């Protein structure tokens, strides 16, 4: 190995170490794929309720009392709420597990200053958006829920791009664009939601796996 090659290798090592200290690089492409699959299953389960083929209310007698008292708990008495909660839980658990396994493979800590900043940058717009959308649901403005989910989630991903792999920012811009477009496409919110959270997550996950994790497997095999 020549001195020039050694210097280049040292620079690459230094760059890698700097990236690891400033960015959370253990996000797994399989996390995106699993989250996308969960979203598509959730959209499939929600379809008959959204389009009036099935009754969205779980207990109609309880719903009448809740509506009369203008109680926000009526939202908890809908199938869509529990489908959404189940979808979100499954997506988060699967994403966490795949990311955890990858961080262990890389020998990097799952919980660090960088991962905390990453989580905070995502949670601030998503949590604020969740409260806003919950209030919209109370007023019966259901047509803006799917666009709102995409918009606030996209903002969270764009914000998180500072602390992880830069590709996630492009996914955020796509989600933002889909959400804004869905505002003017009344009645098609579920399709935009399924495309953004489902298909785009799968496409993103496959791309990330092929770009980063497949190379890691090839290097470890050699």
Image (cartoon, rainbow, N blue to C red):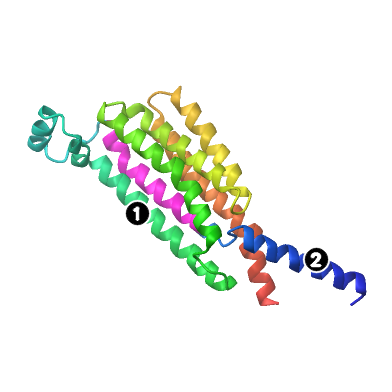
Q: Main secondary structure of the magenta part?
A: helix
Residue 28 visible? The answer is no
**Residue denoted by label 2:** 11
Q: Residues within 10 Å of mark 1 (few under 14, many from 20)?
A: some
Q: Residue at x 45, y 58 (%)?
A: 95
Q: Position of residue 131 (x, y in %)?
A: 34, 37
The quadrant the N terminus occupies is: bottom right
Decide: is 218 above or below 78: below
Using the rendered view, name the quadrant where residue 170 is placed. top right
Q: Nearer the viewer, mark 1 or mark 2?
A: 2
Q: CA distance from mark 1 to mark 2?
A: 41 Å
Whether residue 79 sits left or right of residue 31 in the image: it is left
Please state the extent of the stretch shown in magenta in the rendering.
31-51
Q: Give the secondary structure at mark 1.
A: helix
Q: Position of residue 215 (x, y in %)?
A: 67, 65
Whether residue 96 sits left or right of residue 166 in the image: it is left
**Residue denoted by label 1:** 89
């Amino acid at each position: 190995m020549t001195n020039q090659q050694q210097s280049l290798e040292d620079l690459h090592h230094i760059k890698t170490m700097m990236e690891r200290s400033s960015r959370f690089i253990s996000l797994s492409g399989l996390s995106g794929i699993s989250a996308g699959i969960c979203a598509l299953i959730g959209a499939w389960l929600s379809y008959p309720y959204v389009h009036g083929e099935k009754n969205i209310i779980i207990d109609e007698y309880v719903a009448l009392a809740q509506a009369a008292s203008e109680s926000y708990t009526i939202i908890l008495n809908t199938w869509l709420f529990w489908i959404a909660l189940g979808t979100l839980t499954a997506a988060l658990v699967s994403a966490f597990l795949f990311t955890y396994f990858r961080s262990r493979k890389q020998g990097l800590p799952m919980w660090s200053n960088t991962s905390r900043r990453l989580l905070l940058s995502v949670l601030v717009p998503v949590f604020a958006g969740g409260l806003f959308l919950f209030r919209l649901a109370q007023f019966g403005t259901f047509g803006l829920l799917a666009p709102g989910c995409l918009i606030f989630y996209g903002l969270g991903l764009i914000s998180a791009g500072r602390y992880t792999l830069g590709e996630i920012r492009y996914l955020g811009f796509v989600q933002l664009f889909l959400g804004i477009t869905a505002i003017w496409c009344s009645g098609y919110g579920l399709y935009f939601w399924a495309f953004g959270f489902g298909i785009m997550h799968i496409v993103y996950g496959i791309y990330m796996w092929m770009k980063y994790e497949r190379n890691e497997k090839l290097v470890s095999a050699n």
